[in-house]
Image (cartoon, rainbow, N blue to C red):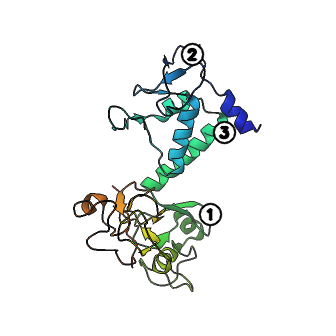
Amino acid sequence: MSMRGQEQVEKRYDPRDTTLKFVKRKDDLDPVCDEDDGLRAEMSCGHAVTPDSLTQWCRSQLDDGYYKFRCPAVGEGTTQCNKLWSYQEVRRLADLSVEEMQYFEEAMSLLAAEEYCETQTCPQCRTSVERKDLSNLCVRCSICTADLKKTYQFCWQCMRKWKGPGPRSDCCDNDGCMNRDLQLLQTCKTLSLPAVEGVAECPSVRACPTCGMKVEHSQQYCKNIDCPRCHVVFCFVCLKLKSECCKTSTPYKICPSGVAPRQAAIPVWQKK
Protein backbone atom coordinates (compact mmCIF):
# COMPACT_ATOMS: atom_id res chain seq x y z
CA MET A 1 0.00 0.00 0.00
CA SER A 2 1.28 3.48 -0.85
CA MET A 3 1.95 6.10 1.80
CA ARG A 4 -0.96 8.08 0.40
CA GLY A 5 -3.20 5.05 0.78
CA GLN A 6 -2.03 4.51 4.37
CA GLU A 7 -2.69 8.17 5.14
CA GLN A 8 -6.26 7.87 3.85
CA VAL A 9 -6.93 4.75 5.92
CA GLU A 10 -5.33 6.00 9.13
CA LYS A 11 -6.66 9.57 9.08
CA ARG A 12 -9.22 9.89 11.87
CA TYR A 13 -10.49 12.47 14.31
CA ASP A 14 -9.30 12.06 17.87
CA PRO A 15 -12.53 11.25 19.75
CA ARG A 16 -10.91 12.63 22.92
CA ASP A 17 -10.58 16.09 21.39
CA THR A 18 -13.04 18.09 23.51
CA THR A 19 -12.85 21.11 21.16
CA LEU A 20 -14.66 19.15 18.44
CA LYS A 21 -18.36 18.44 18.39
CA PHE A 22 -19.04 14.85 17.36
CA VAL A 23 -22.31 13.50 16.01
CA LYS A 24 -23.33 9.96 15.16
CA ARG A 25 -24.98 10.29 11.77
CA LYS A 26 -24.22 9.98 8.06
CA ASP A 27 -21.51 12.01 6.35
CA ASP A 28 -23.34 14.92 4.69
CA LEU A 29 -20.60 15.32 2.04
CA ASP A 30 -20.55 11.60 1.23
CA PRO A 31 -23.87 9.92 2.13
CA VAL A 32 -22.61 6.50 1.00
CA CYS A 33 -19.73 6.58 3.50
CA ASP A 34 -20.07 3.52 5.73
CA GLU A 35 -17.38 3.78 8.40
CA ASP A 36 -18.16 1.39 11.23
CA ASP A 37 -18.32 3.81 14.13
CA GLY A 38 -20.48 6.39 12.31
CA LEU A 39 -18.73 9.17 14.24
CA ARG A 40 -18.52 12.51 12.44
CA ALA A 41 -17.31 16.00 13.33
CA GLU A 42 -19.79 18.85 12.92
CA MET A 43 -18.83 21.86 10.80
CA SER A 44 -19.82 25.41 11.75
CA CYS A 45 -22.79 25.21 9.38
CA GLY A 46 -24.12 22.16 11.22
CA HIS A 47 -23.33 19.48 8.64
CA ALA A 48 -21.40 16.35 9.60
CA VAL A 49 -18.21 15.27 7.83
CA THR A 50 -15.34 12.81 7.98
CA PRO A 51 -11.72 13.95 7.48
CA ASP A 52 -11.47 12.15 4.15
CA SER A 53 -14.64 13.55 2.60
CA LEU A 54 -13.79 17.08 3.76
CA THR A 55 -10.24 16.83 2.39
CA GLN A 56 -11.40 15.41 -0.94
CA TRP A 57 -14.10 18.04 -1.39
CA CYS A 58 -11.79 20.97 -0.61
CA ARG A 59 -9.04 19.56 -2.82
CA SER A 60 -11.49 19.24 -5.71
CA GLN A 61 -12.47 22.90 -5.20
CA LEU A 62 -8.82 23.97 -5.43
CA ASP A 63 -8.36 21.89 -8.58
CA ASP A 64 -11.37 23.70 -10.11
CA GLY A 65 -9.93 27.14 -9.27
CA TYR A 66 -11.84 27.94 -6.07
CA TYR A 67 -9.90 28.96 -2.98
CA LYS A 68 -12.91 29.72 -0.77
CA PHE A 69 -14.55 26.61 0.60
CA ARG A 70 -18.34 26.40 0.82
CA CYS A 71 -20.46 23.56 2.15
CA PRO A 72 -21.92 21.50 -0.74
CA ALA A 73 -24.37 19.56 1.41
CA VAL A 74 -27.97 19.61 0.29
CA GLY A 75 -30.48 20.71 2.89
CA GLU A 76 -34.22 20.76 2.57
CA GLY A 77 -35.38 19.93 -0.94
CA THR A 78 -32.55 20.56 -3.40
CA THR A 79 -31.11 23.69 -1.78
CA GLN A 80 -27.35 23.61 -1.28
CA CYS A 81 -26.06 24.83 2.09
CA ASN A 82 -23.31 26.99 0.49
CA LYS A 83 -22.11 28.35 3.87
CA LEU A 84 -18.51 29.57 3.86
CA TRP A 85 -15.96 27.58 5.84
CA SER A 86 -12.79 29.29 7.04
CA TYR A 87 -9.49 27.67 6.11
CA GLN A 88 -8.68 27.39 9.84
CA GLU A 89 -11.80 25.26 10.30
CA VAL A 90 -11.04 23.12 7.25
CA ARG A 91 -7.41 22.61 8.27
CA ARG A 92 -8.41 21.45 11.72
CA LEU A 93 -11.41 19.27 10.89
CA ALA A 94 -9.92 17.76 7.73
CA ASP A 95 -6.96 16.64 9.86
CA LEU A 96 -4.54 17.69 7.11
CA SER A 97 -1.03 16.27 6.99
CA VAL A 98 1.94 18.64 6.71
CA GLU A 99 2.15 17.92 2.97
CA GLU A 100 -1.56 18.57 2.49
CA MET A 101 -1.39 21.86 4.41
CA GLN A 102 1.50 22.99 2.22
CA TYR A 103 -0.41 22.07 -0.95
CA PHE A 104 -3.60 23.78 0.22
CA GLU A 105 -1.89 26.99 1.32
CA GLU A 106 0.25 27.32 -1.81
CA ALA A 107 -2.73 26.69 -4.11
CA MET A 108 -4.93 29.13 -2.19
CA SER A 109 -2.25 31.83 -2.34
CA LEU A 110 -1.79 31.45 -6.09
CA LEU A 111 -5.54 31.51 -6.78
CA ALA A 112 -6.06 34.57 -4.58
CA ALA A 113 -3.16 36.37 -6.28
CA GLU A 114 -4.63 35.61 -9.73
CA GLU A 115 -7.97 37.06 -8.65
CA TYR A 116 -6.66 40.34 -7.27
CA CYS A 117 -3.55 41.08 -9.35
CA GLU A 118 -1.70 40.05 -12.49
CA THR A 119 2.00 39.29 -12.09
CA GLN A 120 4.86 37.86 -14.16
CA THR A 121 8.59 37.44 -13.72
CA CYS A 122 10.76 40.19 -15.17
CA PRO A 123 12.91 38.67 -17.97
CA GLN A 124 15.92 40.74 -16.84
CA CYS A 125 16.09 40.44 -13.03
CA ARG A 126 13.60 37.57 -12.46
CA THR A 127 11.67 39.43 -9.78
CA SER A 128 7.87 39.43 -9.71
CA VAL A 129 6.27 42.42 -11.42
CA GLU A 130 2.61 43.42 -11.25
CA ARG A 131 0.82 44.83 -14.29
CA LYS A 132 -1.65 47.44 -13.07
CA ASP A 133 -2.86 48.61 -16.49
CA LEU A 134 -4.23 45.42 -18.04
CA SER A 135 -4.67 47.10 -21.43
CA ASN A 136 -0.97 48.03 -21.75
CA LEU A 137 1.65 45.43 -22.69
CA CYS A 138 4.54 47.80 -21.93
CA VAL A 139 5.50 47.21 -18.29
CA ARG A 140 8.19 48.98 -16.27
CA CYS A 141 10.36 46.99 -13.85
CA SER A 142 11.29 49.23 -10.90
CA ILE A 143 14.16 46.96 -9.79
CA CYS A 144 15.89 46.99 -13.18
CA THR A 145 15.22 50.71 -13.59
CA ALA A 146 16.99 51.41 -10.30
CA ASP A 147 19.92 49.04 -11.04
CA LEU A 148 20.48 50.28 -14.59
CA LYS A 149 19.90 53.95 -13.72
CA LYS A 150 17.53 54.19 -16.67
CA THR A 151 14.01 53.05 -17.43
CA TYR A 152 13.73 49.36 -18.18
CA GLN A 153 10.50 48.13 -19.78
CA PHE A 154 9.55 44.72 -21.08
CA CYS A 155 6.70 43.28 -23.12
CA TRP A 156 4.10 41.42 -21.09
CA GLN A 157 3.29 39.31 -24.14
CA CYS A 158 6.62 38.13 -25.59
CA MET A 159 8.58 38.65 -22.32
CA ARG A 160 11.45 40.50 -24.00
CA LYS A 161 12.85 43.99 -23.57
CA TRP A 162 10.26 46.43 -24.91
CA LYS A 163 10.81 47.57 -28.47
CA GLY A 164 8.93 50.36 -30.22
CA PRO A 165 6.47 53.03 -29.06
CA GLY A 166 4.09 52.47 -26.18
CA PRO A 167 1.66 52.04 -24.61
CA ARG A 168 0.18 49.33 -26.82
CA SER A 169 -2.35 46.58 -26.24
CA ASP A 170 -1.69 44.37 -29.31
CA CYS A 171 2.07 43.72 -29.52
CA CYS A 172 5.50 45.33 -29.31
CA ASP A 173 7.93 45.69 -32.26
CA ASN A 174 9.93 42.57 -31.41
CA ASP A 175 9.85 39.94 -34.17
CA GLY A 176 7.27 37.27 -33.51
CA CYS A 177 5.45 39.17 -30.77
CA MET A 178 1.86 38.10 -31.07
CA ASN A 179 -1.05 37.26 -28.85
CA ARG A 180 -1.00 33.47 -28.96
CA ASP A 181 -4.25 33.26 -27.01
CA LEU A 182 -5.98 35.36 -29.66
CA GLN A 183 -4.37 33.27 -32.40
CA LEU A 184 -5.76 30.13 -30.73
CA LEU A 185 -9.26 31.63 -30.57
CA GLN A 186 -9.06 32.36 -34.30
CA THR A 187 -7.72 28.97 -35.40
CA CYS A 188 -9.07 26.38 -32.93
CA LYS A 189 -11.18 23.50 -34.16
CA THR A 190 -14.96 23.50 -33.95
CA LEU A 191 -17.05 21.11 -31.89
CA SER A 192 -20.64 20.12 -31.36
CA LEU A 193 -22.56 20.19 -28.10
CA PRO A 194 -24.55 16.93 -28.22
CA ALA A 195 -26.75 17.89 -25.26
CA VAL A 196 -27.63 21.30 -26.72
CA GLU A 197 -30.21 21.23 -29.51
CA GLY A 198 -29.04 22.99 -32.67
CA VAL A 199 -25.35 23.45 -31.81
CA ALA A 200 -23.35 21.50 -34.40
CA GLU A 201 -20.34 23.76 -34.98
CA CYS A 202 -18.95 26.01 -32.27
CA PRO A 203 -15.35 27.17 -31.67
CA SER A 204 -13.78 24.74 -29.20
CA VAL A 205 -12.00 27.50 -27.25
CA ARG A 206 -13.56 30.72 -25.97
CA ALA A 207 -12.29 33.65 -23.94
CA CYS A 208 -14.40 34.36 -20.88
CA PRO A 209 -16.33 37.57 -21.68
CA THR A 210 -15.62 38.86 -18.16
CA CYS A 211 -11.94 38.11 -17.47
CA GLY A 212 -10.58 36.85 -20.80
CA MET A 213 -9.40 33.45 -19.54
CA LYS A 214 -9.35 30.68 -22.19
CA VAL A 215 -11.94 27.98 -21.51
CA GLU A 216 -13.06 24.83 -23.29
CA HIS A 217 -16.36 22.96 -23.21
CA SER A 218 -16.42 19.30 -22.17
CA GLN A 219 -19.20 18.62 -24.72
CA GLN A 220 -21.32 17.37 -21.84
CA TYR A 221 -24.32 18.90 -20.14
CA CYS A 222 -25.67 22.37 -20.98
CA LYS A 223 -24.13 25.27 -22.90
CA ASN A 224 -23.22 27.33 -19.82
CA ILE A 225 -19.66 27.55 -18.48
CA ASP A 226 -18.50 28.56 -15.00
CA CYS A 227 -15.21 30.42 -15.53
CA PRO A 228 -12.58 28.91 -13.19
CA ARG A 229 -10.87 32.28 -12.69
CA CYS A 230 -13.59 34.91 -12.20
CA HIS A 231 -16.40 32.38 -11.51
CA VAL A 232 -18.85 34.22 -13.78
CA VAL A 233 -21.22 31.87 -15.62
CA PHE A 234 -21.66 32.57 -19.33
CA CYS A 235 -23.06 30.87 -22.43
CA PHE A 236 -20.35 29.12 -24.47
CA VAL A 237 -22.48 29.50 -27.60
CA CYS A 238 -23.60 33.16 -27.71
CA LEU A 239 -21.01 34.45 -25.16
CA LYS A 240 -23.62 36.34 -23.17
CA LEU A 241 -23.81 36.04 -19.40
CA LYS A 242 -26.09 33.22 -18.32
CA SER A 243 -28.48 35.72 -16.74
CA GLU A 244 -28.92 37.40 -20.14
CA CYS A 245 -28.94 34.27 -22.29
CA CYS A 246 -31.59 32.50 -20.22
CA LYS A 247 -34.05 35.33 -20.89
CA THR A 248 -34.47 34.15 -24.48
CA SER A 249 -33.48 30.45 -24.46
CA THR A 250 -33.03 27.40 -22.27
CA PRO A 251 -29.64 25.86 -21.33
CA TYR A 252 -30.19 22.95 -23.73
CA LYS A 253 -31.27 24.85 -26.87
CA ILE A 254 -29.32 27.03 -29.26
CA CYS A 255 -29.56 30.76 -28.62
CA PRO A 256 -31.84 32.86 -30.90
CA SER A 257 -28.75 34.78 -32.09
CA GLY A 258 -27.00 31.53 -32.98
CA VAL A 259 -23.34 30.71 -32.42
CA ALA A 260 -21.25 33.82 -31.75
CA PRO A 261 -18.37 34.24 -34.23
CA ARG A 262 -14.76 33.64 -33.26
CA GLN A 263 -13.55 36.33 -30.90
CA ALA A 264 -11.35 39.01 -32.47
CA ALA A 265 -10.28 40.48 -29.13
CA ILE A 266 -9.75 39.20 -25.59
CA PRO A 267 -11.71 41.00 -22.86
CA VAL A 268 -9.69 42.79 -20.20
CA TRP A 269 -10.77 41.93 -16.66
CA GLN A 270 -11.96 45.04 -14.88
CA LYS A 271 -11.36 43.78 -11.35
CA LYS A 272 -13.35 45.44 -8.60
Q: Amino acid at mark 3?
A: Glu
From the viewer's perspective, tell me whether residue 5 is left or right of residue 35: right
Quadrant position of the C terminus in the picture: bottom left
Q: Which mark is residue 99?
A: 3
Q: Residue sitting at 36 percent across and 57 percent down?
A: 233
Residue 48 location in percent, x, y?
47, 26
Describe the element under mark 2 as helix, strand or loop: loop
Labels 3, 1: front one: 3
> Does residue 262 lie above or below 55 as drawn?
below
Q: Residue sitting at 30 percent across and 66 percent down?
A: 240
> Does residue 57 lie above or below 237 as drawn?
above
Q: Amino acid at mark 2?
A: Asp
Question: Label 2 neighbourhood size at 10 Å, few (<14), some (14-19), many (20+)?
Answer: few
Q: How far apart are the alpha carbons under marks 3 and 1?
A: 27 Å
Q: Amino acid at mark 1?
A: Arg
From the image, tell me which residue sits under label 1: 126
Q: Residue sitting at 48 percent across and 18 percent down?
A: 23
Q: Which mark is residue 17?
A: 2
Q: Residue sitting at 58 percent across and 15 percent down?
A: 15
Name the residue furthest right: 1
Query: Quarter-wise, where is residue 125 in the image?
Result: bottom right
Question: Label 1 neighbourhood size at 10 Å, few (<14), some (14-19), many (20+)?
Answer: few
Mark 3 and mark 1 residues within 8 Å of each other at the beta carbon: no
Tag 2 or tag 3, which sits nearer the N-term? 2
Name the residue furthest left: 247
**How many badges with numbers are in the image?**
3
From the viewer's perspective, tell me whether residue 162 is left or right of residue 202: right
> Does residue 47 lie above or below 244 as drawn?
above
Looking at this view, is 142 or 185 the one in front? 185
Describe the element under mark 3 as helix, strand or loop: helix
